[in-house]
Image: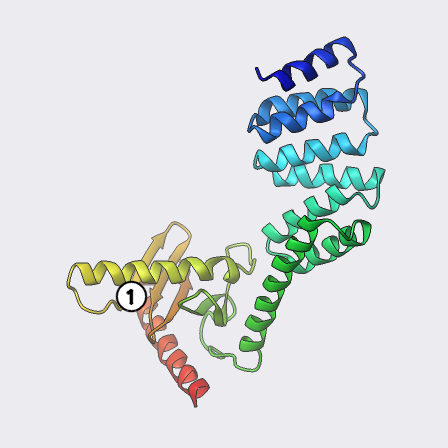
Amino acid sequence: MADDIRALTAELARDPDSLAFLELGETLRARGRVDAAATVARTGLERHPQDPEGHDLYARILADAGNPEAARETWEVVLTLAPRHPGALKGLAYLAYRAGDPVGALELLETALSVDPSDPSVVQALQTVRIAIERMEADAEVRTGADIFAGFEGAEYGLLLVDAQGLILGGVLRDGQGRDVAQEVAAYAAGAAAEAQRAVRLLELGEWRGLVAEAPEGHLHVSAPAPGTVLLVKRERAVPPARLALAAQRAGTAARAWLEAQRG
């Protein structure tokens, strides 16, 4: 056991009400000993349930442990105790950004900056979030006024066109619960297309035309209607493969026509 951890542990043993649990928990967390850090934080909070710093420490440990929901709830507790707590504001902003909500993250970070304008971590996080928002707005601008797949079967949930960088060009892709997952899927789709192209070249099969992924809840057809683009077509499992391929072919024709119009 390192000397600093040994010393802090001894201090807590002498005085269980000591706030040394904050430093000990943070030291353990920084060294990757998440379980031990969580135990220290929980024990400290049993004696100091109204201490916002203790809850902030525990929230960061929960986030490190891959438990964002529990971390969010804990940071919300911090804000009930200290409404402008910078650690909680930054933590909630991080969770919002990771969940695909850069606008929500921006509001939290701007509040954190008003608390401490000199915090470099907040300044850097704001730059990252603003870039993400600019990209979102650019995506929306590209998609506004040009509904590539208007009138096509599945246009409301299962047709998506992206470029080679994963930027959405048009369409919508929703999961089984109706949640829009286009942003999450776009980057993966571009990567999958690149891997498919690489594989067929290594096998000397010529240009790839499409991939079909079959799953218990449905099918996904991936193709490249034009160089540098990827088209995803999602359908229910009951849709026959031939009909899926036909839908992808028709959507690909529409995508190429739209792309040509944009170049013109």
Q: Is residue 55 left or right of residue 180?
A: right
Q: In the rendered image, which quarter is residue 197 located in?
A: bottom left
**Given the image, on which type of amino acid does mark 1 rest?**
Gly
Q: Residue at x 26, y 69 (%)?
A: 209
Q: Residue at x 35, y 64 (%)?
A: 222
In this view, the residue farthest toward the top is: 14
- Which of the image's four quarters has the N terminus? top right
Q: Residue at x 70, y 11 (%)?
A: 10
Q: Is residue 237 left or right of residue 157?
A: left
| Residues packed near mark 1 inside 10 Å, few (<14), some (14 to 19) or many (20 plus) | some
Q: Nearer the viewer, residue 173 or 163?
A: 163
Residue 17: x %, y % from top left: 81, 16
Q: In the rendered image, which quarter is residue 223 located in?
A: bottom left
Q: Which residue is mark 1?
A: 210
Q: Is residue 153 left or right of residue 66?
A: left
- Which of the image's four quarters has the C terminus? bottom left
Q: Is residue 246 visible?
A: yes
Give the colour scheme of this rendering.
rainbow
Residue 6: x %, y % from top left: 64, 14
Q: Nearer the viewer, residue 118 or 105?
A: 118
In this rendering, the answer to whether 78 lies above or below 220 is: above
Q: Nearer the viewer, residue 140 or 135?
A: 135
